[in-house]
Image (spheres, grey):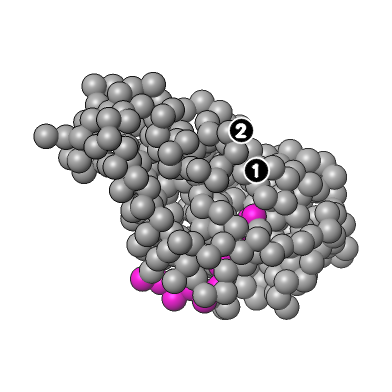
Amino acid sequence: MIAFDKNFTCTYGVAEQVTPQIRRVVARNPSPFTFHGTGTYIIGQGNVAIVDPGPNNKAHIEAVMGALKDESVTHILVTHTHLDHSPGCRLLKEYTDALTYGYGAHGTGRILRGEAVEEGADKEFAPDIELRHGDIVDGDGWSFECVHTPGHTSNHVCYQLREQQVLFCGDHVMAWATSIISPPDGNLSDYLASLDLLLHRNDQTYWPCHGPHIANPKPFVRSYIRHRQKRMDQIVSCLKQGVDKIDDMVPIMYTALPGSMYPAAARSVLATLIYLIDQGMVASDSPDLNAAFRLAP
């Protein structure tokens, strides 16, 4: 069981000083996927970095820039290219000449492996500077280490504020909910490997883009991994009982979830089924949302 923390309040349009070196402005885009909204982070004083400008929301970008007063934005870091994270870069560029940093355009992680990705997400964003795992971004009194964490998307990156061992983890790990893995760009095998990577790091605190921070991250990451294993066990149980379609599995597996969220849950179930196929545990003639699945011989 994951000990979710939903104790989170914010005032839209106001920069909250969450640590001496970190401010957060939450966008007014609450939803079942974003909780209260996307948190945009301002790091440093004077010459600052911004992590995840957020959605295409002019009022939000004005609030971020209004919090800076006489300060300058020198770096814009993007964790991934979903529509609640990267589109704000285009609005932010109206106020600053700062370069954008990220792993690449949407789907880059899979494209580099010669694989196709779905349409949608922020297809217009491409970083000025492409980063790879282990790269260092230096600023005025602060520096970031790039931690490539594919799974939620193939181009998902976390950024460690090295001076404080603080990890800005985007949507990779969140205190209030699990992260959605939606194929084909979302990939459970990659996601589990990325979670395991975090267990071998020295990050002391996580600051996700949605909801509260995570003060004791490693036990929380382990609970995330156990949760994914539980979902696999539920799928195997369904298949043993002859429940072989995703639409029939979802109500059994997600008993507390409102029906409006079933389509999102279905995509996570598909991601898990694809993982089990890759592991040789499940088979399907055509693994998609409408397919029939069966236990492998």
Nearer-the-camera pick, 248 or 186: 248
Q: CA distance from mark 1 to mark 2?
A: 10 Å
Q: Nearer the viewer, residue 234 or 42?
A: 234
Tag 1, which secondary structure?
A: loop
Query: With respect to residue 178, does 48 lie above or below?
Result: below
Rendering coords of residue 90 (x, y %) = 71, 40
Kind of residue at disc 1: Pro
Pointers 1 and 2 in contact (CB under 8 A)? yes
Q: Residue 265: x percent and y percent?
A: 49, 38
Residue type at tag 2: Ser
Q: Is residue 220 visible?
A: yes
Left or right: 238 in relation to 257: left
Residue 32, label in figure = 1
| Residue stretch rendered in magenta on the structure | 200-210
* Most frequent secondary structure within the magenta stretch: loop
List the residue tagged with mark 2: 260
Q: Is residue 264 left or right of residue 211?
A: left
